[in-house]
Amino acid sequence: MSADAAGVPAAPDQAAAAGARRTPAPPPAGRPQGASSGDTPASTLPEVSAAAWDDPEAPPWPMAKGWVAIGVLFSPPLWLELYRAVREGTGPVPVALACALILGYLACYLAGPVLVMRRPVAARAVLSGAALAVATVLVTVFGISPWNYSYALAVAAVVLPWGWAVILAAPAIATGVVLGLLSTGSPDWTLLFLLSVVLIVGPLRATWTANRALERANATMAELAIAADRERLARDLHDALGSTLTTLTVKAGLARRLLESGEPERAGQEVRDIEELGRQALNDVRATVAATHEPSLASALEDARGALAAAGIEARLPRPDTVPEHRVLAYVVREGVTNVIRHSRARRCEIRAGRGFVEILDDGVGRPRPAEDDTAGGTGRPGHGLKGLAARLEAAGGRLEAGPLPGGGYRLRAECPRGSR
């Protein structure tokens, strides 16, 4: 809801997401949008886009950047091996080929996690396999230490699901052990190092994945909180304005008839009442948007008395000073009287109120139309009217009963604990 010339403040969506400790991701495409003029948001939960949950094991950007930093930190051993080969007098062609292979290997290592951010598992497996293949060539052809095999294993452990990582890691570890045995005669340290890479990097990857899932869950919770806040705002606006606007309509019609019958003084009084009701409606909207609207049962009964009288319905109501304060039951009175005026065609209406209950009876045609079928002066949307009222009572620990009376008429009864204020 945007601010207008009348000074109605905009509804703050930020407050709904205050409980989320992490910065939420951009809202999914299916997130409910704010209601347009004359339209209220339906009582539905937001749809989280499929893209937000696509491949939850894909590494997030912070992890990818950290992995690049680790690669830069641990790349010197590769260049030391190349420097040793040059010092021993290896020809220029092998040295150039070794440089190309090392650069390709580093490219696979450094760019791998970034390139596979949203790639299918098969593409990640191909890149990891390429890194392992390059490492094998470096070790077997150019005599680089088998310990450098650990880099390719680390990439596989990070960017692949556990099943794929094991499929690639098992032959890679076996190859590394064999190469270590052939080059050093002692496979123990090589095997220990290769296994340590998988055992250390694997849990780190699992931790990163869990953090990523937590961030997504927090973002989704923020979306749900915003949707719930919008639904509450729509329900509050309906409850706050439904009765007032109905009374405005009735009084405007009465003023027109009085003018047509030549009674300008009475018509003027009705117009003044309409003006006052308009101010009250504006204040109710402002208070509701600011989440400070606290209607009382006494004020709701007083408003109901005037609305029923303006509609020409005989009313029997308790005195406002004899009923306990109860915010939730005040909404019941507002909605019930609105339905009596709009739908019942009743001649008499009685309201009973006491500790923790309110009951509205009329002698009209019976069951009013539900809110979802109310397109003539109603909301035209599900989730409001009696349905929204029942949801409000249920949230407060109460219950709502509504139905036609055996001898004709309609009965609406709400019960709510005394502590639900």
Image (tube, grey):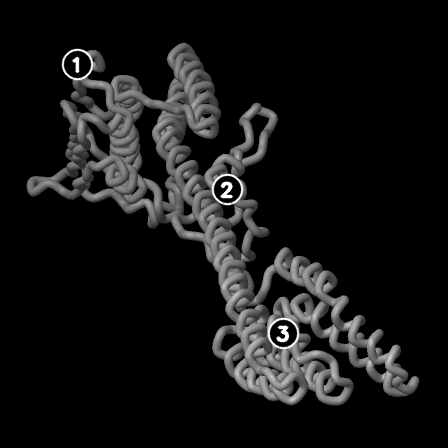
From the top left corner, tell me how far across and down residue 99 is, in percent.
84, 78
Q: Is residue 160 left or right of residue 357?
A: right
Label disc, if present, on residue 21 of the rendered structure: 2
| Side of 126 relative to 46 (left or right) | right
When asked about the image quadrant of residue 270, the answer is: top left
- Please state the horizontal and vertical placement of residue 366, each as a whole percent of the image: 18, 42
Q: CA distance from mark 3 to mark 2?
A: 37 Å
Q: Looking at the image, tell me whether mark 1 or mark 3 is earlier in sequence order.
A: 3
Looking at the rendered structure, the kind of residue marked 2 is: Arg
Asked whether the residues under the numbered discs 1 and 3 touch, taking CB atoms below 8 Å apart as contact, a structural biologist would say no
Alpha carbon distance from label 1 to label 3? 82 Å
Residue 71, horizontal then vertical, whole percent: 70, 65
Q: Amino acid at mark 3?
A: Ser
Question: Residue lying furthest left in this view?
Answer: 407
**Where does label 1 land, which residue?**
322
Q: Which of marks 2 and 3 precedes in the sequence? A: 2
Mark 2 lies on a secondary structure that is loop
Q: Give the mark nearest the N terminus, 1 or 2.
A: 2
Residue 144 in view in this figure: yes
The label on residue 150 is 3
